[in-house]
Amino acid sequence: MDRRTILRATAVGGAAAFSGSLWAGAALAAPAQPGTSPYGPLGAADANGIQLPAGFTSRVIARSRQAVPGTSYTWHDAPDGGACFVAGTGWIYVSNSEISTTGGVSAVRFNADGSIGSAYRILSNTNRNCAGGATPWGTWLSGEEVSRGYVYETYPQGGKAGVRRAAMGRFTHEAAACDPDRRVIYLTEDESTGCFYRFRPTTWGDLSAGTLEVLVAGTATSGPVSWARVPDPDGYPTATRSQVSGAKRFNGGEGCWYAGGTCWFTTKGDNRVWAYDAVNQRIDLTYDDSLVTGTAPLTGVDNITGARSGDLYVAEDGGNMEIVLITPGDVVAPFLRITGQSSSEICGPAFSPDGSRFYFSSQRGTSGSSSGGITYEVRGPFRA
């Protein structure tokens, strides 16, 4: 079963549900190479400064330090990782705030017709909330990108305070991706000598207790791997990444996305997209800019998400300020480009639950400052 078939079965934009799928996509054959996008070339920049393929349109749904349209809620600074969740006949988009000590998570609730119904805070006064991940039970895991940072479990529907999940380990947290088949949560670490982890809750759906493990392997970019328990998830006095001999190092772990037996994750220090085959317990490269023939279309790799089509969408921190597709046929091509914002980075890519709308943020917008963040929505003929 290839990646297109697997992700077509995905409940995109929240908790993904699978049953017995095997991943045997082309990523095992060779890292992806540049090619023609299935959506065609990018057009001229629109009124929002975004270049999109024909048939796609964009709108701004929020700006930092301004009220979200139709609400009195002021959007947070430095929007980062995000995800969508079903909410009655509508949906919710949540977004982290990567601000020191006053970070957290905000949410925008959309009505069934796509209009904005409300906006509100679901986590406050935490530290550099960068990426995270959705759970199958409808919560958002928000990670602190600081030394000995925590993961917080938050509630997109509102009305319930976020909860610190210390058992998931204290390190420089980036993204999280839930694997309901093995009942584990994969975690990336944003350090130049960082590791790739998984957390095994004692009870699936309850993150208050469990076992933190680290991936163990050699220096090769492909091959079999194993897992070892991290003796002290608290990370003091010895950092979690330094507690297990043979733990594999990854240069700046960033985005993380699970579907049908595979967890894709990115490392910004070497511009790579990795695939962990959880069924066969091995890793392989899906993309490596140093192995590209000609000019690399994807650099500054950061957040990642998947679509029902089987396409992976990878956001750039820098680069050409693009969100880049990696297709099931291992073709790499730009999906959109933000113009006039070279001092920013793209964050938080996520599809609405029905897959018809796509959300993301420019963390610093045109100003190059955390107070200038912009969150967007794109609509168009996304392929099924």
Image: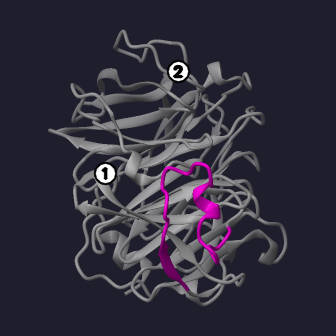
| Label located before the other in sequence (1 or 2) | 1
Q: Quadrant of residue 365?
A: top right
Q: Quadrant of residue 128?
A: top right
- Residue 35's place in the image compared with 131, above or below, is below
Tell me the residue that label 1 is attached to. Answer: 14
At horizontal 53% and vertical 21% (from top left) the residue drawn is 102
Tell me the residue that label 2 is attached to. Answer: 102
**Residue in the foreground of this view, choosing between 290 and 323:** 290
Decide: few, some or many residues near mark 1? Use Cα within 10 Å; few <14, some 14-19, many ≥20: many
* Residue 354 in view (yes/no): no
Q: Is residue 51 left or right of residue 105?
A: right
At horizontal 68% and vertical 67% (from top left) the residue drawn is 272
Amino acid at pointer 2: Thr
In the image, residue 306 lies at what x, y percent? 45, 62
Decide: few, some or many residues near mark 2? Use Cα within 10 Å; few <14, some 14-19, many ≥20: some
Q: Is residue 151 left or right of residue 362?
A: left
The range drawn in magenta is 225-249
Amino acid at pointer 1: Gly
SS class of the residue under badge 2? loop
- Residue 246's place in the image compared with 203, above or below, is below
Mark number for residue 282?
Answer: none
At horizontal 75% and vertical 32% (from top left) the residue drawn is 340
**Residue in the foreground of this view, choosing between 139 and 226:** 226
**Residue in the foreground of this view, choosing between 137 and 60:** 137
Quarter of the N terminus within the rendering? bottom left
Quarter of the C terminus within the rendering? bottom left
